[in-house]
Amino acid sequence: MSDFFTHTNFAGPIHTLVQIGAQGMQDIEEALHIDPAQIVLTTMDPDLAQKADDAFAPWRTADKTAQVDHVAVTAKRARAATSQVQLFENPALASRKKPTGLQTLCPGLTATRQATVPDIAISAFFKALPTLPDGARHVLRFGLTGDEQTLLAAMSDRMAGRFHDIIISLPPAALFDRAPTGDVLRARLYDLGFLPVAQRASPVPGIPECHLIQSPHHAALQTCLAADRDRQREHAEQKTALKTLTRERDALRKALDQTVLDTRDLDALRTRYAALMADYETQSDTLRQVQARVKAALARFEA
């Protein structure tokens, strides 16, 4: 990695180096070589964790900090909260996954030992990082673990935006079970706003390691996209509100129509009632006349 850090793209000091999955003592030596103000390093190899901590001990000062975590950084923390890790003869290789394409690349590759490693979700890992001052240069490096795609997928723009540089291996083929190819990783990094600027051989033969920097236009693009998403959300809310108002309008129109219908029915009933009452009065008069005649006839008969 030293050729990366002496490249013109690294003009100026590096404040923080964060490495997820250290790949042997070479990474420790390179971290010390660039001499940042802060180093945060994870490894799934318990022996490497101890060696790294010992190597950083004489380097640490009041102004220089180094943190070594023996953990497996995962997309999210599972219930078991630990992972079974395979460690290989090549110290650059350690994975929670079964090697598939890696065995084609490295014939005869076998795991030399296994380790049980505590898990930490990448969101919790980033939350626990020391302060990354604004305006300073911060570098994120990924080791070759087979988890790179899930980790990148779990990274938000806000997480990635804290770093100016990302260094990651981009294998031409999937090396572990359900692991991505370099093209898939490159596409995700592009979505996060990182563009490749340099490439070198990695500690694993045949697998290039790529240096990417954050596009200066990514933040502006994300602002535009966020504004567009807000407009789309507002448009959707307006459409929903319009549908609600339309339903309410239709319900009121139906109620009004029913009211008009009910009013017409009431007028018809009133007319019918008036006609019935008039007929009733006529029948009543007729009945009274008949009753009078009957009464008169009875009076004559009794006389």
Image (spheres, grey):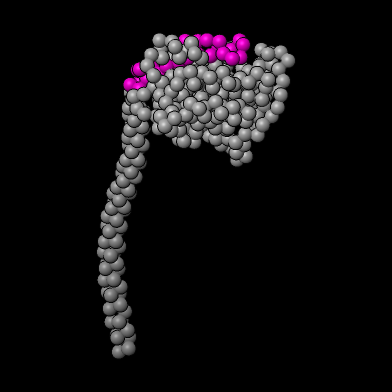
Residue 264: x and y, percent?
A: 29, 51
Left/right placement of residue 220 relative to residue 107 reads left
Asked if residue 203 is among those painted magenta in the image, a careful observer would answer: yes
Residue under the point 42% across and 16% down: 213
Left/right placement of residue 232 relative to residue 155 reads left
Asked if residue 26 is among those painted magenta in the image, a careful observer would answer: no
> In which quadrant of the rendered view does residue 206 lie?
top right
Residue 295: x and y, percent?
A: 30, 82
Residue under the point 32% across and 88% down: 302
Residue under the point 66% across and 12% down: 105
Magenta residues, start to end:
198-221
Q: Nearer the viewer, residue 296 or 91?
A: 91
Q: Nearer the viewer, residue 40 or 215?
A: 40
Residue 12: x and y, percent?
A: 37, 16
- Toward the bottom, the furthest residue is 303
Q: Nearer the viewer, residue 38 or 126?
A: 38
Q: Is residue 298 above or below residue 283?
A: below
Q: Nearer the viewer, residue 70 or 280?
A: 70
Left/right placement of residue 143 relative to residue 15 reads right
Report how many numbered discs are placed on residues in the image.
0
Left/right placement of residue 288 relative to residue 124 reads left
> In which quadrant of the rendered view does residue 275 lie?
bottom left
Q: Is residue 83 above or below residue 104?
A: below
